[in-house]
Amino acid sequence: MRLVNAAEIAVFEQINRILHQRDICKCERCRLDVAAIVLNNLPPNYVVSTEGEVIRAVNPQLKIDVQQELEKAIARVSARPHHHRQES
Ligand SMILES: [Zn+2]
């Protein structure tokens, strides 16, 4: 058994879909920057997962919170992508 953060699972369930709807950089760095911002803004939501069990974010409020935070984080990262900072 292990602990997993349901908020993190919810972020990675939604991040690709939302990124592909936006005209922003989709590189690994930007994707993880967005995920980090969201996960730092949301309270952790730890649940116990038994071995092999697929945990899905089933809490509807959590999904809504994650989606809202994703929108904000995407706006922030696309305005100032990390990987461009040192070039300027
Ligand atoms: Zn990028």
Image: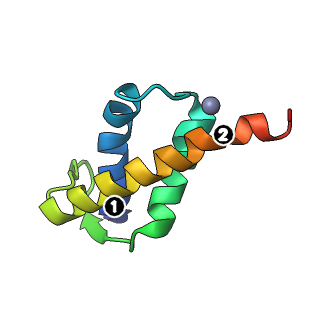
Residue 66 seen in this snapshot: yes
Residue at image mark 2 = 81
Q: Nearer the viewer, mark 1 or mark 2?
A: 2
Q: Is mark 2 within 8 Å of ligand 1?
A: yes
In which quadrant will I find the C terminus? Answer: top right
Q: Is residue 56 left or right of residue 41?
A: left
User: What secondary structure is marked by label 1?
Assistant: helix
Work out whether 22 lies above or below 37: above
Residue 84 picture quarter: top right
- Callout 2 crowding tier (Cα within 10 Å): few <14, some 14–19, many ≥20: some
- Which residue is painted at 22% across and 47% down in the image? 54
Please report the residue visible at 39 percent of the width from the left and 50 percent of the height from the top.
Answer: 70
- For ligand 1, give the image quadrant: top right
Left or right: 15, with 41 as reference point: left
Left or right? Give the position of 75 relative to 84: left
Instruction: Quarter of the image for the N terminus: give it.
Output: bottom left
Q: List x then y, in percent, for residue 12.
A: 37, 44
Residue at left offset 52%, top offset 28% = 26
Q: Which mark is residue 7?
A: 1
Badge 1 density bin: few <14, some 14–19, many ≥20, Cα 10 Å: many
Of the residues shown, which amino acid type is indicated by label 2? Pro
Identity of the amino acid at label 1?
Answer: Ala
> What whole-number distance in Å separates the C-alpha atoms at marks 1 and 2?
23 Å
Q: Is residue 59 visible?
A: no
